[in-house]
Image: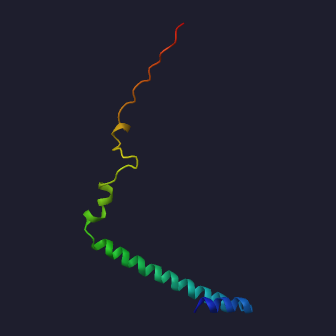
Amino acid sequence: MSTLELVNAAISGDRDQAILNFNSILASKVSDALEIKKVELATNLLTPQEEQNDTTENSIDVDGTDGTELLSEPEPQSTETEQN
C-alpha cells in the first residue's frame, strides 16, 4: 500500500479502505524502524566497552575549566565601611 492509495481512498470517501491503507503504511514504517534499531543494538553489542565510553572520559566543560573551583569554598567578601 502506498500513501497515494491512502489519499485517494480518503478523497473518495472510502473510510474502510483508507483505514486499511493507513494501518499498512504505519506497520511498514514501524517494521523498518525496528529493523534499524536491531542493527544498531547488534553493532553496539559487538563494540568493545572502551570505545563506547571514550566520550565521557574526555569531557571538558564548555567554559574550559575542569570544575575544581566549584569544589572549593568561596572566599568571603571583604566588608569595608566608609568612615567620614
Residue 72 in the figure: left or right of residue 48? right
Which of the 4 quarters of the picture holds residue 4? bottom right
Query: Farthest top residue?
Result: 84
Identify the residue shown where x is 29% and y is 55%: 57
| Number of disc labels | 0
Query: Farthest front residue?
Result: 84
Residue 39 in picture, x, y percent from top left: 37, 79
Identify the residue shown where x is 73% and y is 93%: 12
Residue 62 in picture, x, y percent from top left: 40, 50
| Scheme by which the image is coloured | rainbow
Q: Nearer the viewer, residue 68 or 62?
A: 62
Residue 26 in picture, x, y percent from top left: 56, 83
Residue 53 in the figure: left or right of residue 34? left
Q: Is residue 38 above or below residue 4?
A: above
Identify the residue shown where x is 42% and y is 79%: 36
Q: Is residue 20 above or below residue 42?
A: below
The N terminus, quarter of image: bottom right
Q: Nearer the viewer, residue 65 or 6?
A: 65
Residue 45 in picture, x, y percent from top left: 30, 72
Identify the residue shown where x is 40% and y is 30%: 74
Residue 46 in the figure: left or right of residue 28? left
Which of the 4 quarters of the picture holds residue 49? bottom left
The C terminus, quarter of image: top right
Q: Is residue 84 above or below residue 54?
A: above
